[in-house]
Image (cartoon, helix red, strand yellow):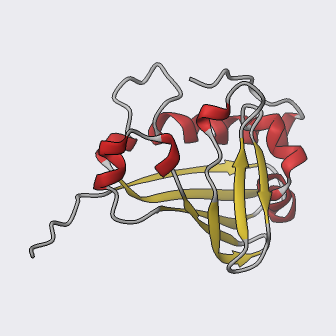
Amino acid sequence: METTKTKTETFVCATYIRTTPEKLWEALTNGDFSVKYWMGFRVEIEQKVGGKLRLLPPKGLERYGDHAGEVLVCEPARKLVYTWNMKDKEPPEVTKKRQSLSRVTYEITPAGPVVKFRLIHENLLPEDIEKDPNTFRGINNGWPAVISSLKSLLETGEAITHSPC
């Protein structure tokens, strides 16, 4: 039996945020904070390797979550890596193509008075990338909206308000 390897893609986004590594880590891992910048989604995470990560949607948007995953690397205020599970939220024909879960990495690097925040989302299918730039659907449209809102909240105290999809 011959196995065909599905072509995968990687999405990378980096920005500089006027904050500390500790405050950024807290924002990324605290559910009460995440609902403010992540369009109402709540992060729940067991901060240990093998811990569970959930991204719970706000009421009325259950069709967009829960992106349950597992923590692969947990280095507080430095690095977080977790799996991203979309299998229950995507069409069955896309699920058949997915050979393994995608993986999200947050890298936090002090850079003087700011922090460099780098997000890497790997093992994506072409279907995970949205061609229409005027929506929040797709990894390529969703992550920049979330990161921009996070940056604004940490720097000004106000998140950018977006309506999901």
Q: Residue at x 62, y 25 (%)?
A: 164
Q: Does residue 139 show up?
A: yes
In the image, taking residue 6 as reference, residue 16 lies left or right, namely right
Numbered-mark total:
0
Q: Residue at x 77, y 51 (%)?
A: 43
Question: Is residue 80 or residue 90 the one in the foreground?
Answer: 90
**To which quarter of the image does residue 42 belong?**
top right
In the image, taking residue 125 as reference, residue 109 lies left or right, namely right
Question: Is residue 125 or residue 74 the one in the foreground?
Answer: 125
Q: Residue at x 76, y 63 (%)?
A: 112
Residue 47 image offset from top left, x and y in percent:
79, 72
Q: Does residue 110 show up?
A: no
Q: Quadrant of the C terminus?
A: top right
Residue 123 image offset from top left, x and y in percent:
39, 61
In the image, taking residue 134 as reference, residue 150 lies left or right, namely right
* Vertical order, 102 against 36 (above or below): below
Question: Is residue 159 or residue 131 the one in the foreground?
Answer: 131
Q: Residue at x 15, y 71 (%)?
A: 3
**To which quarter of the image does residue 24 belong?**
bottom right
**To which quarter of the image does residue 6 belong?**
bottom left
Residue 141 image offset from top left, x and y in percent:
49, 33
Residue 44 image offset from top left, x and y in percent:
79, 56
Question: Is residue 138 or residue 77 the one in the foreground?
Answer: 138
Q: Quadrant of the N terminus?
A: bottom left
